[in-house]
Image (cartoon, rainbow, N blue to C red):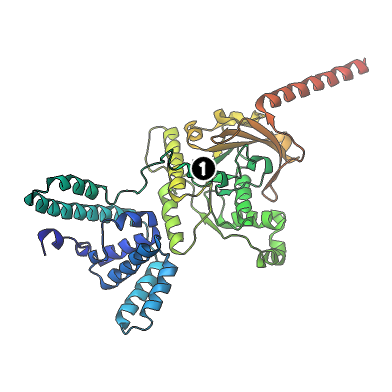
Amino acid sequence: MNSFQKTSYFSHYGKEFQEKIFQSLLSDHNWSAQMIEVMTPEYFDVRYLKYLCTRFFEFYSKYKNFPTMQLLITIIRDDLKEGNDGILRDQIIDYLHRMKASPNIGDLDFVKEKSLDFCKKQALKQALEEAVKMIAAENYDSVVGLMKDALAKGEPHTVGHNFFEDYEARFALINRITCPTGLGPIDGQDILNGGLGKGEIGVVVAPTGVGKSHFLVHVGCEALKRGKNVIHYTFELSETQVGIRYDSHLCGINSSEIRENKEKVLEKYENSEFGRLIIKEYPTGTASVMTIRNHLEKLSMRDFKPSLIVIDYADIMRSSRKFDSLRHELKLIYEELRNLAMEMSIPIWTASQANRESAKSDIVGLENMSEAYGKAQVADVVLSLSRKPTEKASGYGRLFVAKNRAGKDGILFPVQINTAMSKLTILENAGEMTLEDAVNAQNQNLKQLLKQKWKEIRDEE
């Protein structure tokens, strides 16, 4: 064994670190695709991890895809069923049970970074050894290619979109997978084209008490109705309070009456085809994007993969870095959320607080986003809700498409906001209005009001 090969093992990291390497392989298949280029199962010196990694990589070699934990368990069960190696079987069962029961995934990012870096260095060392042999044989031309290949191993696979060769991908976007809002005109082809798509971040902006949280529950419910899995993060309301809002919307019962209608609620869910819902509460200002990322990885270890992430709301999250100005921290939070959405290929809906001036506005625009206009720059879609205090009793308000990367914006819709059921409805036969239309309509209403008042004064004379 040469000097390079003597160090080509994970033994110096210890057993616990090696267990986390395989745990990372199971939980992050994009990272696994990088690792398979630069490591072999022989890098493990723990026998059961070497066995598991062998089966894991063999499955990929045959099917060009990595198995889930559940599928890997099935493969191993069939493989060891007839065998006499009871010790190996018991070790594997014990490890998988420990990993599933207590994932402890907070440090997996560190493990992935260290182990990938180690394997890439080993691949480069092996290439250098081969290069020495080639130079000795005066095979100089092959050395450059060998070193280029070694340096490229372990890197992310995609090199970008080849415009003329990868044209099918552009047309496939027409049938993109989306999470509809349930608001017909908003989900229409000319605005959201089906809803919020994978890797996109949508923001609803509103002043305090207008209905941001109710909107987020509304979009979460629409995803559940379509059989999609939803994870709802709440930083102000408790998990049970948010759960009652979901009960109210899905069952058509006012939130104040949910507890008195337990049987009706359970009957509604008994034969339903709703997706799965996880509601997770964190105290205000304590959760960062890394906190959410770690929680999502923990859920993935328990076979829960969300189709939609709802965050109520990003403005009160904790930034991963401290700045002198709050607006810089808020922009960073939104940038990290968008990176999370893109990396996990999952749409994210969140909310943003509008400034105090917006409470008096008929329409809330991007300029009303509190503290950081940069939040609007990061978002793919920005919707705003507005209703004046005098309108709250009637339940009516305005929904404005303030920003939209992939469709029309500057469109206004009259909506009914049912806070008792966390449900929004665009009024029937309500045509879309531009901002100019809304201003003209408001001016026309003002003229009519003045005429009416003038008539009343003349009649009194």
Mark 1 Cα shell of 10 Å, populated few (<14), some (14-19), many (≥20): many
Q: Nearer the viewer, residue 295 or 458?
A: 295
Residue 270 lies left or right of residue 291; in this view the side is right
Residue at (47, 36) in percent of width and height: 378
Q: Position of residue 249 (x, y in %)?
A: 68, 53
Considering the numbered disc 1 on the image, is that residue within a helix, a strand or a loop?
A: strand
Say which quarter of the image contains residue 59: bottom left
State whether residue 77 appears in this view: yes
Where 19 falls versus 456 (above or below)?
A: below
Q: Position of residue 448 (x, y in %)?
A: 81, 21
Residue at (20, 46) in percent of width and height: 145
Q: Quadrant of the N terminus?
A: bottom left
Q: Quadrant of the C terminus?
A: top right
Q: Which residue is mark 1?
A: 201
Q: Nearer the viewer, residue 366 or 245?
A: 366
Q: Position of residue 81 (x, y in %)?
A: 38, 82
Where 276 falls versus 359 (above or below)?
A: below
Give the amino acid type for the residue marked by disc 1 in the picture. Ile
Residue at (53, 43) in percent of width and height: 171
Residue 142 lies left or right of residue 177; in this view the side is left
Residue at (70, 33) in percent of width and height: 432
State whether residue 210 appears in this view: no
